[in-house]
Structures are given as structure tokens and as C-alpha cells.
Image (tube, coloured by chain):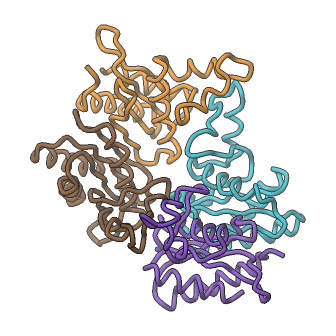
Chain colours: A orange, B brown, C purple, D cyan
């Protein structure tokens, strides 16, 4: 079973509250099991350019079933997945994309967050994913 | 002043309630004054392919400051704007995209809805825009 | 010799004055002999979506050395150039793109105008091209 | 309030005069608050390929509310935003894109300049932004 809208809204709300708590305006995107967009919000005053990044982080995490930042460790010059960012209509390989798992460990979607420093993005995404 | 997240959420909620009332699962997108995406939701069981359509309907409405269906009246074969859909990274020119105006009549964004018959999409979008 | 910036500015200014005279806010683009963009302006309150259209009209006119609307006569369903709009990164085949010729009749560029009805766009573009 | 055409023209003219003063032919682009293009000029003999770069620099600056070169400090191999240039339809992360602020510090647009060495591009863009 994929993620429902109510679940996605709960995840996004947890992420948004975390973003407020750390004082950064974020773009937040959630994709479902099929890597198709389920929900997106841009908080007021968040970077306009972070919308596309948040969506691509969520897609990257679900497309490869790992945090987006893990992809980035492999995509550097000389690395085994160099320039993988060119594929799938554009990936984002730095932190802020996190897979969402159900209570059995099954991946049901992913969340992508962009707007702060990458560790802030990652923290907000992890908080969101943890609220599932 | 452009649309805030709280305003966008209120609009989307009004649209979603209308969609439930008419019994159709919808994709709902909202863009701000600059035609940049502010909010997106896909209701459970809504067409996957309608996500992109909802987003493009919202963009089309704001890019030309008219309902998306008005563009379609002009873009038919032999019409004055034939194939305008090829521009701006892809437009959608059938109904379901509606501009959002503030109380002074100023356009502050647009909503795009896709998932049902076009008259249903248009009704849901209009309900959403009216909730601003 | 291709069009200079001063010439392009003179053309754009003539087009802009015509747009003001007929009371329509326009997007105005000028490309040079190589179909590369030389100048672009969006008048205040002009449609956001008409920027891309103005640029593509100018490119279409220079790429085929005819007014953009002439292309549209050939690109209709059943016509000899059906869906030519898909080529060259996107063409616009309705009126508003006009070639710019020097005093010897040599084509040195093109102007594209978008923001009003297509006959208004065409009139503004023609005025601009005539100011060369 | 976003940037007007007259303001954009004043900014572009200041940038162009600076470009003449340092003896480099430049492409100059200005986007508004919504990151939508407002004005573009290519000076005579400026690189053809710098048109797209100038536009993307302006967009990059506004999409992330910082100079384009600041993005580039973070997007290097091993850096926190590696390959961010793949997002938003293509970013440019080297210097020459500068945000435009009004007298209250509010960002109302951005200018992108390309055609010289990056420090020249940056100097011309800064001169333009300072003329607002």
C-alpha cells in the first residue's frame, strides 16, 4: 500500500514544524511508492529555486531507495556513479531526500526538503519521514 | 503581496472538499504571483498523469491571466493561437486552471485541477479560487 | 552585417510606442541574423507567458525568413508542415513574428511580439521592423 | 512591488556603461521578483553563448537570493551542493549574477552578466544592481 494524502500531510506538517523550530523556510516534497509526486509545499519566504530541488531530492531517494546524500557519495568525479545527476530528468544527490518506510521497513515513498544548509534539509526530511 | 502558504492551504482544502462532494479524486496545484509552485496535492486514487496537468493548468492561468480553458478556445487548428501549448515548457489549454484574485481584483496566483471531466476540474478549481 | 544593439533598441522602442498607442502591454524580442537573441523587454503588466512566445516568434520568423503567421498557414492538421512547432526547441506559428530587412532587402534579423490579440501583436511587430 | 521596465532599463544602462568602461562586450539579463525575464540585451560583438549564461545567472541569483558565485562555492565536487546546476532547468553557479534590492533591502529581482572574465562579469552586474 502506498502513502495516502492524510499520511503525506502528517509527514509534511511534522517537517514544517521542524523547519520552523530551526528557523529556516523550506520547500517540502513527498513522493509515493511509484516516485510520483503526492504533496508539495513552499513555506513563505523559502527560496524559489528550492522547489525543484526538494522534488528532485524526494524522487532521487525513492528512485534508488536510499537517502539522496548517499547517491552523492558515489557520484563525485572518479566515483562509480559519476554524473548520475543527468539521468531520470535530473537528480539531486546532496542531502535532504529521505525514504519513508512503514512499520515493517517497506519503503512507501520519500520526502525531499530544500531551503537551508544541507544538514538542516536532512534534519527536516528525517523528522518528516519519522512521522509516518 | 503574493499568496501565502496558509492561504494556499485554505484554497486547496476548499477545492478538495468540492472534489469529495462531486465524488472525483483530483490533483490540485497552486502557483503564486510569479507563476512559481506554492502547493500541490494528489488525492488518493487520482490519476498519476493528472499531476503534471494540474500544475500546467495553474501555470497557464497565471501566465496569461485567464482561465486555462479560455486559452483553448483560441489554440484550436485554424485558431489564432494554434499550438500555443508548445510554449513555456508546456501549457494545458483545457478547463481546470483558474486565476486567484484578491479582494481588489489583483491576480495573486492561480489554481489548476485535474482528475475528472474538464467541467468537474473547472468547478473544483473555481471553488478553490473562490475561497481566497 | 547583422543588427546592432542601437538598431535593436530603436526597433524595440518603436514597437513599444506602438504598443502604448494601441493600449496593450507587450513582450518584445529581437533576434539577429543568426537567430540569436539580441534584445528582449517585457512591458509592465504584460503577460508573463508571452515572454517565451515573443522570443519564439522572433526565432521562427528568422529561422524560416517569413512572418511567423505564414508558418502557421502551413502547419495546420492536413497541411504540409503539420506540427512543425515541435522543431527547433519550439516554434510559434501564429502572427507576431516579422523579419527585419535592411534597405537592400537583406534579412538581418526578426522581431517577435506577444501580449495582445494576434493582429495587435503583428501590428506592433511590423511597426518595429519598419523602424529599422 | 516588482521591478518596472524603466527601472530595468536604468539598471541595464548602468551595467552597459560599466562594460564599455572596462572594454568588454557583455550579455546582460534582468529578472523580476518571480524570476521571470524582464529585459535582455547583447552588446555588439559579445559572445553568442553568453546570452543563455547571463539569463541563467540572473535566474540563479533570484532563485536562491544570493550572488550566483556564492552558489558555486558550494557546488564543487565534494561540496554540499554538488551538481545543483542540473536543477531548475539549468543554473549557472559562477560569478556574474547579483540580486537587486530596493531601499528597504527587499529583493525585487536580479541581474546576470556574461561575456568577460568572471570578475568582470561580477563587477558589471554589481554596478547594474547598484543603480536600482
Kindly identify the residue that appears in the image at 33 percent across and 40 percent down: B49
Residue D119, horizontal then vertical, whole percent: 82, 51
Depth check: C20 or A43 in front?
Answer: C20
Q: Reply above or below: D15 against A115.
A: below
Kindly identify the residue that appears in the image at 57 percent across and 40 percent down: D87
Query: Is residue D130 something one can see in this rendering?
Result: no
Query: Which image quadrant for residue A35?
Result: top left
Residue A20, horizontal then vertical, whole percent: 40, 35
Query: Is residue D123 something one can see in this rendering?
Result: yes
Where the C terminus of chain D falls, by quadrant? Answer: bottom right
Query: Which image quadrant for residue D29?
Result: bottom right
Kindly identify the residue that appears in the image at 51 percent across and 37 percent down: A53
The residue lying furthest to the top in this view is: A104
Q: Is residue A117 left or right of residue B108?
A: right
Kindly identify the residue that appears in the image at 32 percent across and 27 percent down: A11
Residue D57, horizontal then vertical, whole percent: 67, 52
The residue lying furthest to the right in this view is: D23
Amino acid at each position: 500500500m502506498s502513502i495516502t494524502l492524510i499520511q503525506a500531510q502528517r509527514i509534511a506538517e511534522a517537517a514544517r514544524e521542524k523547519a520552523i523550530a530551526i528557523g529556516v523556510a523550506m520547500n517540502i516534497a513527498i513522493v509515493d511508492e511509484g516516485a510520483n509526486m503526492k504533496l508539495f509545499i513552499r513555506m513563505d519566504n523559502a527560496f524559489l529555486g528550492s522547489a525543484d530541488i526538494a522534488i528532485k531530492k524526494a524522487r532521487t531517494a525513492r528512485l534508488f531507495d536510499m537517502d539522496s546524500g548517499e547517491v552523492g557519495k558515489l557520484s563525485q568525479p572518479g566515483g562509480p556513479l559519476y554524473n548520475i545527476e543527468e539521468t531520470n530528468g535530473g537528480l539531486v544527490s546532496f542531502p535532504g531526500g529521505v525514504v519513508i518506510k512503514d512499520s515493517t521497513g517497506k519503503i512507501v515513498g520519500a520526502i525531499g526538503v530544500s531551503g537551508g544548509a544541507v544538514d538542516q534539509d536532512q534534519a527536516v526530511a528525517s523528522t518528516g519521514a519519522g512521522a509516518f
